Image: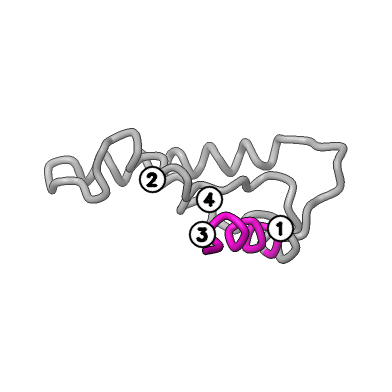
Amino acid sequence: MCRNIHTLHNFEPAATDDEVHAAALQYVRKISGTTKPSKANAEAFDRAVKEIAHLTRHLLEDLVSTAPPKNRDIEAEKARARAAKRYAA
């Protein structure tokens, strides 16, 4: 599950709230061992996602880098090229 969490730091444009939420959701899913919590655990699950997303946003705002920001489109193309090479028949 966690391989769906992507690096969010040092990209231009900066990570969106949706990307931060998706990463938090994947993290909570991995830690809890479930993709959909029971009704009894739904409130705790949703609260954890919200809190982790909030903390992640603060982390991303506080991190500094001397490297120039990466371009999302270029990095996505590199990832597609790596996948094509890896899964070529």
Give amino acid for label 3. Asp
- Indicate which disc residue 20 carries: 4
- Indicate which disc residue 18 carries: 3
Q: In which quadrant of the rendered view does residue 64 lie?
A: top right
Q: Residue at coordinates 47% horizontally, 52% vertically from top-left?
A: 21
Give amino acid for label 4. Val
Give amino acid for label 2. Met
> Earlier along the polypeptide chain: callout 2 or callout 1?
2
Estimate the x, y position of residue 32 in percent, counting from the top left: 28, 35
Image quadrant in which the N terminus is located: top left
Estimate the x, y position of residue 10 in percent, counting from the top left: 74, 46
Point out the stretch of residues depicted in magenta: 77-89
| Residue 26 lies in the magenta-colored region | no
Q: Residue at coordinates 62% horizontally, 59% vertically from top-left?
A: 85
Give amino acid for label 1. Glu
The Cα–Cα distance between marks 4 and 1, rounded to whole angstroms, is 18 Å
Estimate the x, y position of residue 61 in percent, counting from the top left: 69, 41
Residue under pointer 2: 1
| Residue 82 lies in the magenta-colored region | yes
- Indicate which disc residue 75 carries: 1
Q: Mark 3 and 1 residues: CB-CB less than 8 Å, in contact? A: no
Q: Mark 4 and 3 residues: CB-CB less than 8 Å, in contact? A: yes
Secondary structure mostly seen in magenta is helix
